[in-house]
Image: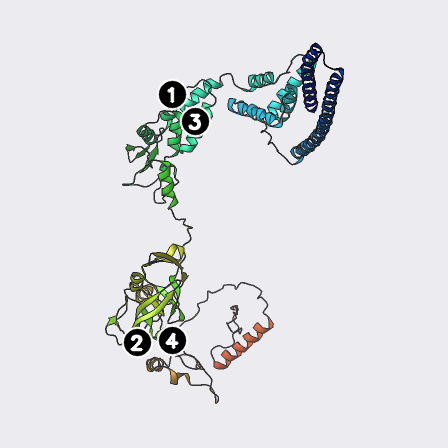
Amino acid sequence: MATEKGNVVGTKAQEQAHAQQEQAHPRSKRERGQSRHPQEVRTTIGGLNDQLNNLIQENAKITRAAKLMIADLNDDLREDIRSLRRDLADLRKYVRDEGLKVPKPAMYNGARSATIVENFLFGLEQYFEAMGVSNDLIRINNASTFLRDAAQLWWCRKHAEREKGICTLNTWELFKSELRKHFVPHNAETEARGKLRRLRQTSSIPDYIKEFTTIVLEIEDLSDKEALFYFMDGLKDWARVELDRRKVQTLDEAIAAAECIIDYSTKSKKPNPSNSEGDKGGQKKNFDRKDGGTFFGGSSRQDRPPSIKRDAQSHRSHTSCAMVHTGLEEKGLLYADLAIQGKSASAMLDTGASHNFIEVEEAKRLGIQLNKGEGTIKAVNSPAKQVLGIAKDVKVKIGDWQGTLDFTVVPMDDFKVVLGLAFFCKAHAFPIPEAKSMVVIDSNMIRVIPLKRLEKPNPMISALQFKRSLKNSEGYIVTVRSLAEEEDGPTKPRETLPPCIQEVLQEYKHVMPDELPKKLPPRREVDHQIELEPGAKPPALAPYRMSPPELAELRRQLQDLLDSGYIQPSKAPYGALVLFQKKKDGSL
């Protein structure tokens, strides 16, 4: 580029000099014609020479500048080429080591299916294109490494024929043709058309669409109109009616519309244990039909869902509002932590209570001022109780909500504070037991307050539960008292017992004496005796050995019974084994 520029500059200088010479020549002719003085001619020629020298010097300067510029451009170009080569080497190293890793196609085991063979060949072509393999021989040699089982045996035979010169597999198209010829059935399209004609929806719509598209891909010349007819014909009646209502015109529209329909018929249902094969009288039996319908009690009805969503958007909005249920039911009442008059407390939430209630001692602890109240309060299966007072405008704070509430002070056993409908109405709140939380809507703001579940503090049973428990078993009256020892000795228990209990103990004093009598009971009308069979031989069994503590306890009890006269020595051939069981205190 710089050389061309220098040539152009030289050419212009020559043209300028030539023009000046032409101007000078006519002038010199005129001068000769006019017989000018020779001195003037020499002066003119000297000026021309000076101009020519100046032009030559300028041309040399321009040439040197062009050469320097060309040299600089050559250096920059060489540096750019070296940089590109380094980048290309780095890129090749990245692609080879850590770069694009093309997944290998799946292995082919020789399955005689047109769909599997075509998918295998298509995967190989995509793999070779991604790896940049265009040579047919390299493709064929690499494709043989993805063959297994029957396909690998086929290639072994073809490879032997290639070495002998019997078979020539030199092109990729010939390799694909030979593979299809051996593993694709000749009547694959006919079989696919038969499957498509017999295809019916027996499960979910997505499964039907998957099976339909798989069969359609095996048929090359199937028109869109025929495919739409077969697709609509194989659907269940309710799905076909819905697609007809939407007026689908192409196969793509039909598949898209079918995917938007909610299929309720495929949802699993838990079997009802009451419906068995031997049920009789009034129970309906279900018999499956070939077309997907169901007979109910002898009358035919299509197995269609109760409702069909019109589009996918309504289906998404319908399912997004569903709550996730874990299936684990947590027991207990709902409690909330709150602050009353600045002091912490715990309240039970009861939507069945009409007012807010607080226990007497809890009201004193919280420092609530009581006003005189009138009236009674009555709970289920309990007598009415007198209201002890009313607390007005009590400051309460629950989570982010705070306000004033009125409390009715009543005697309670199980709960300290109860928040009823009066609180829910004033705070515009409602509990969500599933999430263990409470939503408060106040001042156009929504607050969520966490709750907790707790069991009843005192395990008590109601009067109805106690009455039902006495129907099948006996009942006992038990009293619990504390036995404290004084400094001068043990206390007298009976002096601290209630009078009614003392009367019962005094009446049955002979049944429960402090010590057992040391004599036999008097003879009764019926005397007990052991009747022996004459001539019977006793069984000869060796007694098991007793431990020293058991043997000592046996001797002690036998001596006590002998001293009391309950037993006497006997020489009878029969005896009874003795078994000891430890008591709670460890004694025998």
Q: Secondary structure at mark 2?
A: loop
Q: CA distance from mark 4 to mark 1?
A: 84 Å
* Residue 106: x %, y % from top left: 58, 29
- From this viewpoint, which residue is outermost toward the top? 33
Q: Nearer the viewer, residue 270 or 69?
A: 69
Tell me the kind of residue under disc 1.
Answer: Lys
Residue 270 shows in the view = no
Specify the quadrant that holds the N terminus: top right
Tell me the kind of residue under disc 3.
Answer: Phe
Q: Which quadrant of the view contains residue 86?
A: top right
Q: Which quadrant of the view contains residue 16?
A: top right
Q: Which residue is mark 4?
A: 365
Dot 1: within a 10 Å radius of its alpha carbon, few (fewer than 14), some, or many (20 or more) residues? few
Q: Which residue is mark 2?
A: 370
* Cβ atoms under marks 2 and 1 closer than 8 Å: no
Q: Nearer the viewer, residue 261 or 277?
A: 261
* Residue 30: x %, y % from top left: 68, 12
Tell me the kind of residue under disc 4.
Answer: Arg
Q: Which mark is nearer the camera, 4 or 3? A: 4
Q: Nearer the viewer, residue 276 or 172?
A: 172
- First in sequence: mark 3 or mark 1? 3
* Residue 308: x %, y % from top left: 33, 36
Dot 4: within a 10 Å radius of its alpha carbon, few (fewer than 14), some, or many (20 or more) residues? few
Q: Which residue is mark 1?
A: 225
